């Protein structure tokens, strides 16, 4: 996964998770309690800012944030997705 290692390092260095050593890319985050709901909200904002994306709707499912690998898959999909065009009001 393209972003898994970067995400793992970010989660530790920016205090999203409290671990004594490196965070394995496949470590369960939500189900283990390493990442709580308040930190998840902060993380989503950080990912939106860092990667220039908008995580919303069905993409907010817990499964997308369970591991760094699952987050990497989400990022890869959102970053490569075409940006929706602005709708023009009917005149």
Image (cartoon, rainbow, N blue to C red):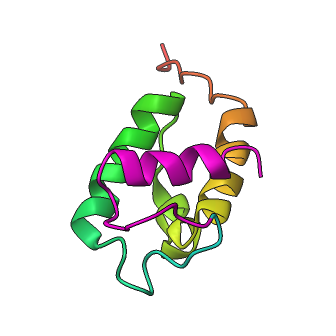
Q: Please, which residue is most extreme toward the left here?
A: 38
Measured as percent of width and height from the top left, residue 44 is found at 39, 50
| Picture coordinates of residue 81, whole percent (x, y) | 72, 37
- Asked whether 17 falls inside the magenta stretch, the response is yes
72 relative to 48 in the view: left or right: right
Q: Residue at x 58, y 69 (%)?
A: 67
Q: Is residue 76 left or right of residue 89?
A: right
Q: Residue furthest top?
A: 91
Residue 40 higher or lower than 63, as above or below: above
Question: Which residue is situated farthest in the bottom direction here?
Answer: 31
Bounds of the magenta span?
1-24
In the image, residue 59 sits, relative to residue 81, either above or below, namely below
- Which of the 4 image quarters holds residue 40? bottom left
Q: Is residue 81 left or right of residue 75?
A: right
Q: How many numbered circles are shown?
A: 0
Q: Identify the residue at image location x=50%, y=20%.
A: 90
């Amino acid at each position: 996964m393209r972003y898994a290692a970067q995400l793992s390092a970010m989660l530790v260095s920016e205090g999203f998770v409290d671990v004594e050593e490196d965070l394995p890319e496949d470590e369960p985050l939500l189900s283990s309690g390493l990442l709580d709901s308040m930190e998840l909200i902060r993380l989503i904002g950080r990912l939106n800012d860092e990667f220039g994306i908008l995580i919303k709707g069905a993409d907010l499912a817990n499964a997308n944030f369970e591991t760094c690998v699952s987050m990497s898959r989400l990022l890869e999909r959102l970053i490569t997705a075409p940006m929706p065009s602005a709708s023009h009001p009917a005149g």
